[in-house]
Amino acid sequence: MKLAPRLLPPLLTLALALLCWEAAVRLAGVPAYLVPAPSQVARAAWEEAGALAVGFWLTGSAAVLGALLSALVGISCGALLAHSRLLERAVYPFTVFLQTVPLVTVAPLLVIWFGYGLRPVVVSAFVVSLFPVIANTLSGLRSVDPHLHDLFRLYGASRRDRLLKLELPAATPSILTGLRVSAGLAVIGAIVGEFFTSYAGEDAGLGVLVTSWIKQYRTDRVFAAVALAALLGLALFSAVGALSALLLRRWHASAREG
């Protein structure tokens, strides 16, 4: 896969957007505490490189752990629900609850249950990113060609063989789609979790840095932290995309280069 032709258009678009942003801010005379110029954001990122690096590591660790946990639990739950209509009707509505209840109303409870630090942030990332994995796993497993099920039964395949050799491979594209969505949501969950479950100090995640700098009206530093959080989400999304290409490129149309 040639990366340069793929990366060039978005990089050019980004460069053009940054140039327009810089020119608009300077020509309009917008105060830096409202909207800083990209050059000011870059300068702030350089000055706070140490704090941002630590924040990136802490938030990234929580997001990755939450995403991995949601992948493990989500795929397992999706497989269980796909093999029992009764269980699906009894449990699936409660999984939707994870997607509909605002995290900001649940995050303060995580402090009571798990205290401060990494654990509640991981749980926050897990809660937010779980539903897409369950939903896509369930959809993928339920979309397997019925004729293939009949063929496996004809040859006396056990339920375990049907799951491992037919259903999960056929559902892999759908599962990977859920994991891509989950990866981005895990970063959001970690950031929001840090708003409520962490505190400022030497070891502060990106969410803590954002809340601290907003209180100080250091908008350029807020933009730098937000940009780094966006890069973290992009990195996780790209990692799942690379895994998807590795698993699907030999047989699935979605991974073939056009």
Image (spheres, helix red, strand yellow):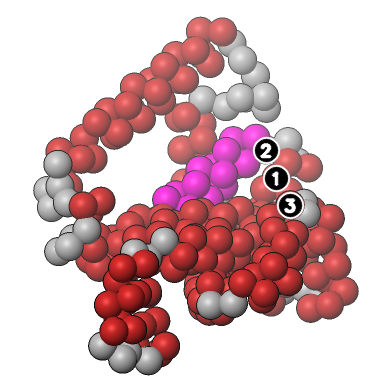
Element carrying mark 3: helix
Expressed as whole percent of the image width and height from the top left, the position of residue 214 reads 73, 41
Expressed as whole percent of the image width and height from the top left, the position of residue 130 reads 60, 65
**Residue plotted at (51% across, 31% down):** 40
* Residue 175 in sight: no
Seen as rendered, the residue at the extreme top is 27
- Pick whichever of labels 1 and 2 is earlier in the sequence: 1
- Mark 3 belongs to which amino acid? Thr
Q: Is residue 227 magenta?
A: yes
100 or 13, which is in the foreground? 100
**Residue plotted at (84% across, 55% down):** 105
CB within 8 Å, label 1 to label 2: yes
- Pick whichever of labels 1 and 3 is earlier in the sequence: 3
Magenta span: 219-236
- Mark 1 belongs to which amino acid? Trp
User: Which numbered marker is on residue 213?
Assistant: 1
Expressed as whole percent of the image width and height from the top left, the position of residue 205 reads 62, 61
Q: CA distance from mark 3 to mark 2?
A: 33 Å
Query: What is the magenta segment's predominant secondary structure?
Result: helix
* Residue 86 in sight: yes
Q: Residues within 10 Å of mark 2 (few under 14, many from 20)?
A: some
Element carrying mark 2: loop
- Establish if 175 lies above or below 103: below
CB within 8 Å, label 1 to label 3: no
Q: Nearer the viewer, mark 1 or mark 3?
A: 3
Q: Residues within 10 Å of mark 3 (few under 14, many from 20)?
A: few
Q: Which residue is mark 2?
A: 218
Q: Residues within 10 Å of mark 1 (few under 14, many from 20)?
A: some
**Residue plotted at (67% across, 38% down):** 218
CB within 8 Å, label 3 to label 2: no
Element carrying mark 1: helix
User: Which numbered marker is on residue 100?
Assistant: 3
